[in-house]
Image (tube, rainbow, N blue to C red):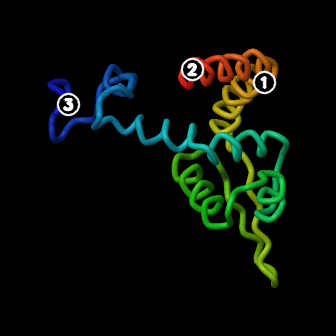
């Protein structure tokens, strides 16, 4: 336990503003990073930047994702506070997914990475081809 926090006292302001350490195996920030940067997490966040979507709309827009993987991904992002799941009390069930304020913030960072990759895809593919030819030659 941190020396500035006792069993009966509230955490100090310094404790509240301590950063995580993603390189430490026991730091919870590593799990959050895994949720955000997973194959489907990145794509779900990017898709939700366009606005609120039903599950089926997300599945159609993120080609290749299974229903199970999309569901697990959305649950993880919801648990992290990035995705808001709204279930409307109607029959058949109507569930919508949207980004929270922190979800929009992290999704904007993901969008920057996606945009950079898309703009630089040709040099990246050329580097891959060169690497492959060097390894096989």
Q: Answer few, some or many: residues within 10 Å of disc 1's Cα (few below 14, many 20 plus, some between 14 and 19).
A: few
Q: Which residue is mark 2?
A: 137
Q: Give residue 31's position: percent from left, percent from top.
A: 43, 42
Residue 104, located in which quarter of the rendered image?
top right
Q: Secondary structure at mark 1?
A: helix
- The image quarter containing residue 41 is top right
What is the distance, in whole Å, between disc 3 and disc 2 at their CAs? 60 Å
Q: Residue at x 57, y 37 (%)?
A: 37
Residue that carries the numbered disc 1 in the rendered image: 115
At which x and y percent is residue 1?
A: 16, 34
Name the residue that disc number 3 marks.
Answer: 5
Question: Residue at the spot x=65%, y=17% of the render?
Answer: 130
Tell me which residue sits at (69%, 57%) in the image: 65
Quadrant in the picture for residue 24: top left
Q: CA distance from mark 1 to mark 3?
A: 43 Å
Q: How would you rate the neighbour count of disc 3 (Cα within 10 Å): few for under 14, some for 14-19, many for 20 or more?
A: few
Q: Are marks 3 and 2 in contact (CB under 8 Å)?
A: no
Q: Nearer the viewer, mark 3 or mark 2?
A: 2
Of mark 3 and mark 2, the one earlier in the sequence is 3
Q: Residues within 10 Å of mark 2 (few under 14, many from 20)?
A: few
Q: Secondary structure at mark 3?
A: loop
Q: CA distance from mark 1 to mark 2?
A: 33 Å
Q: Judge whether 12 appears above or below 96 on screen.
A: above
Of marks 1 and 3, the one in the foreground = 1
Q: Residue furthest front?
A: 137
Q: Are marks 1 and 3 in contact (CB under 8 Å)?
A: no
Q: Please name which of the two marks, 1 or 2, marks the residue nearer to the observer.
A: 2
Q: How many marks?
A: 3
Percent across and percent down for residue 67 are 68, 66
Q: What is the x, y in percent for residue 4?
A: 19, 24
Q: What residue do we see at 72% from left, 62% from top?
A: 86
Is 29 on the left-hand or right-hand side of 114? left
């Amino acid at each position: 336990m941190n020396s500035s926090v006792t069993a009966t006292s509230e955490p100090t302001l310094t404790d509240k503003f301590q950063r995580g350490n993603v390189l430490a195996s026991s730091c919870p920030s590593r799990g959050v990073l895994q949720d955000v940067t997973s194959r489907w997490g990145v794509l779900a966040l990017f898709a939700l930047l366009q606005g609120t979507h039903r599950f089926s709309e997300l599945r159609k827009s993120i080609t290749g994702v299974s229903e199970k993987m999309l569901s697990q991904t959305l649950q993880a992002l919801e648990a992290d506070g990035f995705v808001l799941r709204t279930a409307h009390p109607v029959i058949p069930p109507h569930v919508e997914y949207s980004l929270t304020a922190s979800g929009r913030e992290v999704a904007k960072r993901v969008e920057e990475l996606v945009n950079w990759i898309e703009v630089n895809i040709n040099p990246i593919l050329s580097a891959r081809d060169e690497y492959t030819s060097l390894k096989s030659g």
